[in-house]
Amino acid sequence: MTEIKTNINSMKKFILLILTVLPLTVAGQQVIPLYPGEVPNNRVTGSDADPRPAMLRKVINPTLEVYRPDENNATGAAVIICPGGGYSVIVFEGEGVTAAKEFARNGVTAFVLKYRLPEDTLQVNKTIAPLQDAQQAVKIIREQAKEWGLDSDKIGIMGFSAGGHLASTAATHFENVLIDNPENTSVRPDFQILVYPVITMQAELTHQGSRDELLGLNPTKETVDLYSNELQITEKTPPAYITHSGDDSLVPVKNSIQYYKQLLKHKVPAEMHLYPKGNHGFVLREPVEEWMHPLFRWMRNSGFISTP
């Protein structure tokens, strides 16, 4: 019980940090609905709050907010960004929009995903709702790649904290398609970028708040194992870039280390950057161009963006 209280207090401190550093909301270049019609698995209908706040809570209608590079700088690569927030909020500005703008400046089209947060009152099966939205995002961007001027083989997914769990779930569960997909479009991301990610749902290492929100208070061992993404890696898992700080008191760095080890075991190309200090949410305190610089180098070296 003491450990759970400590975890909750740490999350509260993290949320306060976010609120003190977030910039004013800046609208994206375009916002597109994730589903053309009825949202699958929803219990309710209605409108989300508008205008969009810096931090989102209840999401009924998931969307993609698009940030496009200048035409003369476009690389054809795209990334879907899943901000974190413990599966209880979405840190849309600090972990979504800020990174999206930097991607666009570097020639990568960025789509910030406003995904459904798991909630029994809003979804029939809350556990699959975020993954449905991530899969739908990959699907529609791949199907409309030509319209966006994108290479359909260079569509990646990025996630922070609990959003990192969502991104790694999309990268390891793509063979179990949970959305309507009449064209049989691949929902496998071509690469994954994980920033201080929640990876495991195993009790000894997980972020308990994220696990409770996604799986409920008494999940079965089968469900816990299924959403422990270090156990779901295969040779088909897409290449990964991972970054974390060793002193993370909210999401233990062993989440990233275990994932990295399993990627290597299955011969999946992976690069990991570990910082000795910074704690959880360190990107909110660092200039975006600094912590993202090694990421762009990895993307160039991996062939996802062209080398200047």
Image: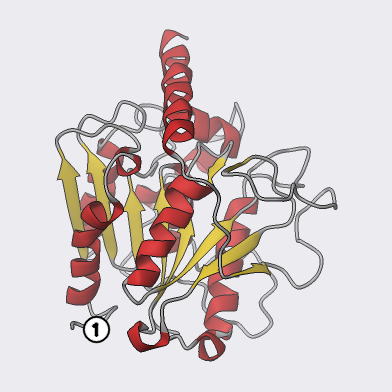
Query: Is 186 on the left-hand or right-hand side of 79?
Result: right
> Which quarter of the picture shows residue 32?
bottom right
The residue beneath circle 1 is 306
Query: Is 258 on the left-hand or right-hand side of 27?
Result: left
Q: Residue furthest top?
A: 2
> Which quarter of the picture shows residue 264?
bottom left
Q: Is residue 150 above or below residue 275?
A: below
Q: Residue furthest left?
A: 276
> Element at badge 1?
loop
User: Residue 82 location, x and y as percent?
Assistant: 49, 54
Residue at screen point 46% across, 41% down: 22
Can residue 10 be seen at all in this image of the molecule? Answer: yes
Residue at screen point 45% across, 17% down: 9
Q: Quadrant of the C terminus?
A: bottom left
Q: Residue furthest front?
A: 24
> Which quarter of the picture shows residue 6?
top left
Q: Is residue 196 above or below residue 69?
A: above
Q: Nearer the viewer, residue 239 or 56?
A: 56
| Circle 1 residues within 10 Å: few <14, some 14–19, many ≥20 | some
Q: Nearer the viewer, residue 89 or 74?
A: 74
User: Residue 157 location, x and y as percent?
Assistant: 43, 64
Can residue 168 be seen at all in this image of the molecule? Answer: no
User: Residue 162 location, x and y as percent?
Assistant: 46, 43
Q: Residue furthest bottom?
A: 146
Q: Is residue 299 above or below residue 93?
A: below
> Callout 1, which amino acid?
Ser
Q: Nearer the viewer, residue 142 or 180?
A: 142
Residue at screen point 28% across, 62% down: 240
Q: Nearer the viewer, residue 66 or 10?
A: 66
Residue at screen point 56% across, 30% down: 212
